[in-house]
Image: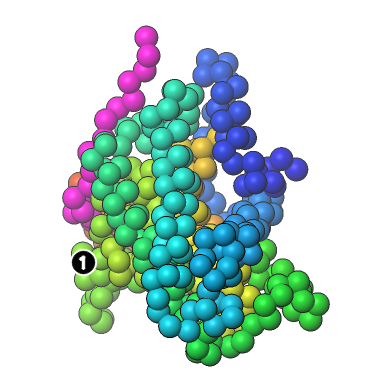
Amino acid sequence: MTQYISPFLWPTINVYKASTFDEEKDVINKPVSYGYLPLNDHITSMFAAVRSFLMAYGAIYYLSPMIQPKGAYPAFNNIASEYEMSWMLPMLVRNLLAQFIIAGFWDWLLYFSPLKEKFAPFKMNPKYPSNKQIFHDMFWTTSATITGTMIEIFLCYGYCNDYFPAFEENFFQEEQLYSNLAWAILITHWRIPHFYLIHRMMHPWKTKKIPDIGKFLYKHVHSLHHKSYNPTAFSGTSMHPVESTLYYSACFIAVPFGCHPAIVLGCIIDCGVGAWLGHDGFGSPGSGDYFHYLHHAHFDCNYGAEHVPMDRLFGTHAGVKGGLKRIWKNEKVGSYGEKGNDTAVHDGEERKKKD
């Protein structure tokens, strides 16, 4: 049961596991990637989706009355019928504070706090990111949060001007209760195919039959994210504005179905929090995603996430580096510094153990 509710116990359960681990006696389980999730992990991911939904619900019904000048979430009561700084600025400040509290705290705990040595044995890459990388990623993640806020602002404006299908303001209204709950519980699952498609689009397509648009998009857009081949929490949404717009646009999937704004905002939150925690670079008791870590390390594989096995379906899954040759045959592929990828990446440094 603890595994299932672990998203609600973050970060206390992570700190407890790291603090009680004995590097000399206990065994570190080697991370593996199958390209799909076992049933237990699917359940855990649903709890994580519920966490994102509850954060959105709290922001709408409990935080908005305190920070919004008209005392309600701007999508309600025609508050956002016009673009005004009075309701847009509190939304931006809220989102930026959440970013620095979650991603900033987690990076501090793992890389700078007195507990960093407790987490060190679980680092996937033995090198540690430089301060230059962390500040670089912090800047672009802040840019991405601004982009996500602009999408939320447009959604509120659209709701108030009837651009989108109407929704029932009461989330627990009986007629839509079960569909609302299903959308909320499955947030991560229904947004992952969208992530796979936009992410795969921004990597080289390795085809000569049509122009390789992916190669162009990688060079001019997505390569910024891949500068952080040794990722941290702030690397999660360290993206070019074009990419962050596409990434957070997953929330529009729910809009045509008349879903409650808490589900739509929950998707935006899930995109952010999922990326920040999933990029931390540490296996359990960290929260890093080994499947996606392999993508950062080896580039030409694992474009989606294991919740929905799109990479298995389209033959782009690699559990180890050797899987790249199986996927791409004789194409030039591989890690940074090899011919397959010439992205200029941040340098790192080896872990310095205490005497």
Colour convention: rainbow
> In terms of depth relative to the viewer, which is nearer, 336 or 58?
58
> In terms of depth relative to the viewer, which is nearer, 270 or 88?
88
Residue 267 shows up from this direction: no
Q: Please report the residue visible at 48 percent of the width from the left and 46 percent of the height from the top.
A: 102
**SS at badge 1:** helix
Quarter of the image where the N terminus is located = top right
> In terms of depth relative to the viewer, which is nearer, 339 or 352?
352
Q: Please report the residue visible at 30 percent of the width from the left and 55 percent of the height from the top.
A: 140
Q: Quadrant of residue 213?
A: bottom left
Assess disc 1: are there few (<14), some (14-19) or many (≥20) residues with their C-alpha within 10 Å of its C-alpha.
few
Q: Please report the residue visible at 57 percent of the width from the left and 59 percent of the height from the top.
A: 66
| Numbered disc total | 1
Q: Quadrant of residue 224?
A: bottom left
- Please state the horizontal and vertical placement of residue 106, each as a whole percent of the image: 46, 40
Quarter of the image where the C terminus is located = top left
Residue sitting farthest toward the top: 355
Residue underneath mark 1: 220
Kind of residue at badge 1: His
- Please state the horizontal and vertical placement of residue 226, each as a whole percent of the image: 29, 54
Residue 13 shows up from this direction: yes
Give the magenta-colored segment's residue range. Answer: 338-355
- Please state the horizontal and vertical placement of residue 350, each as a whole percent of the image: 30, 27
Q: Is residue 243 left or right of residue 38?
A: left
* 45 is higher (above) or lower (below) than 57: above
Q: Is residue 183 left or right of residue 212?
A: right
